[in-house]
Image (cartoon, rainbow, N blue to C red):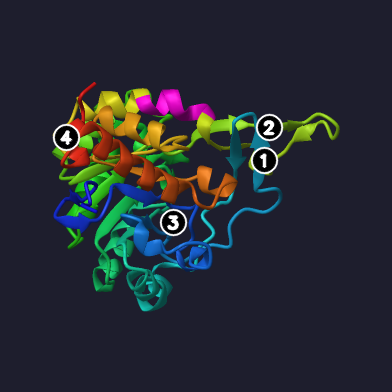
Amino acid sequence: MTNRLETILCGVNMQNPVIAASGTFGFGDAYAAHFDPSRLGGISGKGLTLGGSVGNKGIRVWETPSGMLNSIGLENPGVAHFVKTECRRMRALGSAVICNLGGHSEVDYVEGARLLNDADMDILELNISCPNLKAGGMAFGMRAETAADITSKVKAVTRFPLFVKLTPNAGDIAGVARACEQAGADGLSLVNTFLGMAIDVEKRKAVFDNVYAGLSGPCIQPIALRMVHQVCRAVNIPVMGMGGIDDWQSALAFLMAGAAAVQIGAATFHDLLTMCDIIDGLQAYCEKEGLENISEIRGIV
């Protein structure tokens, strides 16, 4: 059977445009007992910080109608451990290796990106939704100026294609996207989680120690789709779209909105085989519609 899903993302060859989203798939090996990870186009590994983190205390996950809130706190083993151990394991899984890098300061990002040059990976995904503690907690991705500044600094030190992961909480996400492109980003990933909150009415207190948390799942899909559509029309670099995708039809919608690839996150918690079903569904769609390649429908809406 002819593979009609082959995708090239900034020079990286992938057998399909379906990627496991960062923070939902670990580094991939834990899922090997359930399906062959080489079926995926790529894996965006657990978000890393320079020195690692034990994550947040208290409740970390809370179910919501058609979604979930999480306050994991970027629990991770750190960049050095990833370079030494995890990236080799990810490479052995047989799909494209995407490293997601977060940080709390400019130094974290730049030094982390420099150290990652020693890793066997394909794409660096820069998560600029993390707090900039030196700027009073302002997220790097909230304003075009700060997003562009950190993008240019990381681009100057990395040897990999640089995708910048955007926060949907920015007031002008298209403006932030354009600024990142002008600063040298090779691509963009969006959307990250929306800021939400849960209250335990029995205990009369906020569920999470940090009060607010990240909302994901099918409930955010229409808003995420709109933002991906807007950004794809604002820039001339590829976009990895995500946000509540849970079947092949919703994945197809993001591709039709202009995304070059899609990332699947929360849906995997509900059904471990969601990404496999999406790949099969997209392949069947191409065959039914007589498409030689899935890219033929990219951005048609």
Q: Which amino acid does label 4 sit on?
A: Glu
Distance in Å between CA atoms under marks 3 and 2: 24 Å
* Mark number displayed over residue 62: 1
* Mark number displayed over residue 296: 4
Residue identified by numbered label 2: 198
Label 2 vs 1, first from the N-terminus: 1
- Relative to 82, say whether 13 is above or below: above
Label 3 vs 1, first from the N-terminus: 3
Distance in Å between CA atoms under marks 2 and 4: 42 Å
Q: Please rate how many residues cluster around mark 2, counting C-alpha atoms within 10 Å: few if below 14, some from 14 to 19, many from 20.
A: some
Q: Which residue is drawn at 33% across and 33% down?
A: 252
Q: What residue type is labelled 1?
A: Trp
Residue identified by numbered label 3: 47
- Relative to 254, say whether 55 is above or below: below
Residue at disc 3, secondary structure: loop
Residue at disc 4, secondary structure: helix
